[in-house]
């Protein structure tokens, strides 16, 4: 876990040194430094919480590969990737923050390789949880969740590999990358 956090920090620092938009980098890095990753084993913080925002994880623009669930408690925001039956998460890319600061290509498409939260799950998993302190977030913000997913048959063989986005508003008409809005005032447990 420490090596993943160190890798995340190195990636964020590399992004900081190569970015032209210092305002974007400073807010994104602050959020990234405060995010922590955990797997389903450590999902205890949300056991007594109800998701206040829910978005489908849409694979290949048409397959229900799972859900993105958003939870709040007194101190934290939790973003959970939950794969559907026979679907597995291979890689996640997550942006939580101001819409104006999301990493985009020159054509206005989301650039997931520069999303501050990224995790490779070489064994594949069905649940991943990210935790963010609420104090680092604005009252309203966006979440854009991307994943590389795969589906297995009854014998466990991989039969399908897809890109997947959380459903919501499209960034533009040419891209199927999406985001959804979250306001802390709409979510009270």
Image: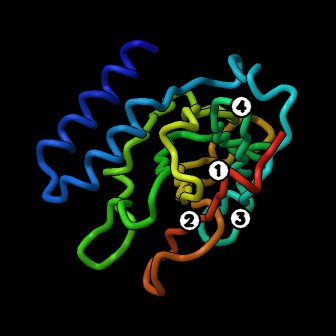
**Secondary element at image label 2:** strand
x then y, percent, for residue 129 = 63, 33
Give above or below for 187 relative to 4.
below
Residue shown at the point (73%, 33%) measured from the top left: 73
On the image, which quarter does residue 179 sit in? Answer: bottom right
Nearer the observer: mark 2 or 3; the answer is: 2
For the residues bearing labels 3 and 1, Cβ distance under 8 angstroms: no
Which of pointers 2 and 1 lies earlier in the amino acid sequence? 1
Distance of label 2 from label 3 (alpha carbons) = 17 Å
Q: Which residue is mark 1?
A: 159
Residue shown at the point (52%, 51%) measured from the top left: 138
Give above or below for 57 relative to 61.
above
Q: Which residue is mark 4?
A: 74
Q: Which residue is mark 3?
A: 63
Q: Is residue 1 left or right of residue 28?
A: right
Nearer the observer: mark 3 or 1; the answer is: 3
Q: Please tell me which residue lies in front, 26 or 104.
A: 26
- Mark 3 Cα shell of 10 Å, populated few (<14), some (14-19), many (≥20): few
Q: Please tell me which residue lies in front, 119 or 157.
A: 119
Which of pointers 2 and 3 lies earlier in the amino acid sequence? 3
Nearer the observer: mark 2 or 1; the answer is: 2
**Secondary element at image label 1:** strand
Distance of label 3 from label 1 (alpha carbons) = 13 Å
On the image, which quarter does residue 174 sit in? Answer: bottom left
Q: Which residue is mark 2?
A: 179
Nearer the observer: mark 4 or 3; the answer is: 4
- Mark 4 Cα shell of 10 Å, populated few (<14), some (14-19), many (≥20): few
């Amino acid at each position: 876990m420490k090596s993943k956090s160190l890798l995340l920090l190195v990636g964020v620092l590399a992004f900081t040194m190569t970015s032209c938009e210092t305002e974007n980098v400073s807010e994104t890095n602050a959020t990234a430094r405060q995010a922590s990753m955990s797997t389903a084993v450590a999902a205890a913080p949300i056991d007594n919480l109800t998701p206040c925002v829910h978005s489908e994880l849409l694979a290949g623009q048409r397959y229900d590969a799972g859900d993105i669930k958003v939870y709040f408690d007194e101190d934290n925001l939790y973003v959970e990737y939950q794969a559907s039956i026979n679907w597995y998460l291979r890689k996640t890319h997550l942006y939580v923050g101001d819409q104006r600061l999301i990493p985009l290509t020159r054509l206005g498409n989301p650039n997931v390789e520069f999303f501050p939260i990224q995790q490779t799950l070489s064994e594949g998993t069905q649940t991943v949880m990210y935790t963010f302190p609420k104090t680092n977030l604005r009252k309203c913000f966006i979440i854009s969740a991307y994943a590389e997913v795969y589906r297995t048959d009854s014998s466990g063989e991989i039969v399908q590999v897809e890109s997947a986005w959380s459903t919501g508003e499209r960034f533009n008409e040419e891209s199927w990358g999406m985001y959804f809005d979250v306001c802390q005032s709409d979510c009270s447990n």
